Image (spheres, helix red, strand yellow):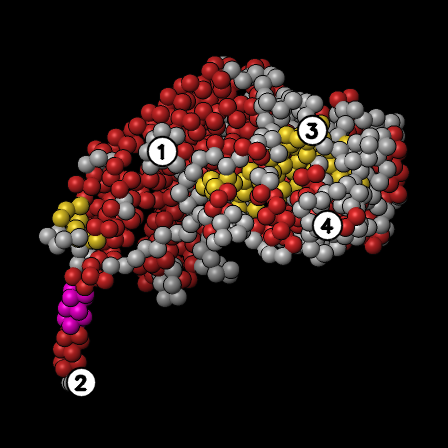
Amino acid sequence: MSTGTTEALEGAKPDDPAAPLPASNGSSEAPRLTNGRRLGRGMLKKSDLYRSLWKGADELRGGMDASQYKDYVLTLLFVKYVSDRGDRTLLDVPDGAQWSDITKLRDDKEIGDKLNKIISRLAEANDLHGVIDLADFNDENKLGRGKEMVDRLSKLVGIFDDLDFGSNTAEGDDLLGDAYEYLMRHFAQESGKSKGQFYTPAEVSMILARVVGIGLNTTPDQTVYDPTCGSGALLLKAASEAPGGMSVYGQEMDNATFALARMNTILHGYETAELWHGNTLSSPQFKEPDGSLKKFDFAVANPPFSVKAWTTGLNPNADEFARFEGFGVPPEKNGDYAFLLHVLKSLKSKGKAAVILPHGVLFRGGREADIRRELVKRRLIKGIVSLPVNLFYGTSIPACVVVLDKESAASRKGIFLVDASRGFIKDGNKNRLRAQDIHKIVDIFTSQTEVEGYSRLVPFGEIESKANDYNLNLPRYIDSGVVEDVHDIDAHLHGGIPNRDIESLDPFWSALPGLEEAVIAESGRPGYSHFRLERDQLRASLLEHPVSQSFIDRAQAEFSEWSRSQKPTLEGIQIGSRPKELIADLSETLLDRFRSLALIDPYRVYQRLMDYWVEAMQDDVFKLSAQGWTAFVEGTPDTDLVPASLVISEYLADDQVEVDALAVEVENATHARQAYEEEHGGEDGLLADARAESGKLTAASVKARIAEISAAPAFSDELECLETFQGLVARESAAKKSLKQGETRLYNAALARYERLSEPEVRALVVDTKWTSRMAADVRDEVQGVLRSLILRLEELDDRYARPLGALVADTDRAAERVAAHLRAMRFE
């Protein structure tokens, strides 16, 4: 289809019935079908919310950096949310502190001062002074003076005016909590190295929660503690892993960051979380009645790395809580082990913890070596996970997760090590763990499965040996390096593919029996083989081989069986369904389905589903969980849920073919006109004198030139050229008119079909045509990627060894002789 017809109806003008429709390509673009108004019920989508909130952040960027303007945006987000959902929170929204009171301030000359007063009133009613009223909305140095401040704050308030948090009632919809985390992540990213430590990436937080065992069996009376909770991201993510809830405790030293944590816990539904402001090492707030440290079931922490002033306000040699007793005092200018030992002391007798620390704690000497030795001897370290570099916003150095477990210390045989340092993707200027990386780490760690080059249970005897002397640096125990691809000199000299390289592909040959024989043949030289096929035949022959097709078919059959088993669940989504539980079940069953298939990495298949969930599917499911399928049929059709492209491909395919054909005619006519103009439109061309003053050929300028020379026989050639060009222009114009008429017919037919859609038809369009077909295509691509990786390796070997040295020398000699012959012919011997 032409460019015009591939655009979505989103951009249609209210009075334009021929607004372009999307091509039948499965696009989820949301068209407009009536009076320029989007079809649908206006439930707030995560993607739309995030875009709006970041736009709000943009309004403030001029006067301050990210570490400052986040306080303004997050405060208004909090106030708007509490006001919209006041009856569903534990907070009191008094008269005069409603969002409607803030709306009235737009364009008010005293908007900054009045905003401060409204927020202060809300803070006073809920004991949130020092939490939601830290940002000064009347600060001229940050927000500008006079009209500049009024305009900036009015725009910011206007952005929040357009958001309705009260309409998002889907069960399990943590829309605002997710939005808050989205903003925190982006603010951390923009705040720079020195100011981004308030946020722990959600992906890392999930690993910590899961490796300590927080999950389905966690009970509400169990406790989770973060002694350096920052904005609360890690603590809340850990708590969210317990569907039944749990008791939340945290402490944070920085006042502004503590305020973020308090707002964060409320937005996530943890209004009763106990958070304290203060220095955890010098003034821990959570204590037992006897004055000792309070003990928790679980602890997670991401303390500041290698902080030098950790002894401020503390005499570590006379610590009243005996945190260092039996282990030794950490170095005066490095507090990593101080935080770890505080966490250890804060655990119950069966408590478990996961702490993010720099890699140096695993191998540094001196006092830290003594502490590490004692931890190993007492069998308190269950495992260590090495993470990729550059994950965190406060630092780019590599970090690890140290997992402590008091419960099983007596029977522990070794320390389970996981080197997950290579599993990530680039995300801007940072690295990020994918869903597949998280799942793999947790699966391997939980099951204590040893995977060559990735994980290993290292016996204490090996760690305590003289050679290792309690050093826990992972490269000592796991060789995770990439195997070097060694060139074979003999093959370069004499030809042939080294059997060593062929044998390295044994996983493929074993899973695809008969394929090796079809591709590889003995060369007659011991230790070397050759390809049966020419280079240009290799790819097609391998992909079309029956064994390859059987491999693809097996994988597709597994997916088809999975999709059939999940179809009742997807079609059964209704008001009150829990989207996050649904995607957890979908993804786990898909992962399990592909675990047994050779060559296919089940985690990559899992990642495909999770990517699609974030891209589009989650918005659909949350919407259906809040409104149900009937809302689409009984109300105004929602083209976010059912894109026009689906209706067209399912019910109007012939009409689409007609429009596509008309679009092709437009392209052909335009190309013919452009080619003719290029041929004759040069400075000396027959169309040169027909150009307008602007230098362009226009219908009017061509017509005028024809009238000027039509009676002059001397210009017959030019006249014929101009009339031919006129005909091409007329053809192009007629083609465009026909296309517009065809688009109008398709538009009207689509609108009429929308109005006749039944609920079963809507379910089928969404579940089968939209969701399942997309996932099937993703799985197919993943499976074919396995075969493509084999092909690429074979082609690489062919490129490397196809021409041995003797052949290359002969080629060079022949080329040199040809050059010499040419030189002799030109008498340049």
Q: Which mark is residue 223?
A: 3
Residue 812 drawn in magenta:
yes
Mark 1 near mark 4, Cβ–Cβ under 8 Å?
Answer: no
Foreground label between 2 and 3: 3
Residue 721 drawn in magenta:
no
Q: Of marks 3 and 4, which one's residue comes earlier in the chain? A: 4
Q: Residues within 10 Å of mark 2 (few under 14, many from 20)?
A: few
Which three-letter amino acid code belongs to the residue tagged 1? Arg
Residue situated in front as seen by the camera: 731 or 186: 186
Q: How many marks?
A: 4
Foreground label between 3 and 4: 3
Q: Residues within 10 Å of mark 4 (few under 14, many from 20)?
A: some
Mark 1 near mark 3, Cβ–Cβ under 8 Å?
Answer: no
Q: Helix or strand or loop: what does disc 1 sit on?
A: helix
Q: CA distance from mark 2 to mark 4?
A: 73 Å
Which three-letter amino acid code belongs to the residue tagged 2? Phe
Q: Of marks 1 and 2, which one's residue comes earlier in the chain? A: 1
Magenta-drawn segment:
804-815
Q: Which residue is mark 1?
A: 780
Q: CA distance from mark 2 to mark 3?
A: 91 Å
Q: Which mark is residue 212?
A: none
Q: Of marks 2 and 4, which one's residue comes earlier in the chain? A: 4
Q: Residues within 10 Å of mark 1 (few under 14, many from 20)?
A: some
Which three-letter amino acid code belongs to the residue tagged 4? Ser
Foreground label between 1 and 2: 1
Q: Which residue is mark 2?
A: 828
Q: Helix or strand or loop: what does disc 3 sit on?
A: strand
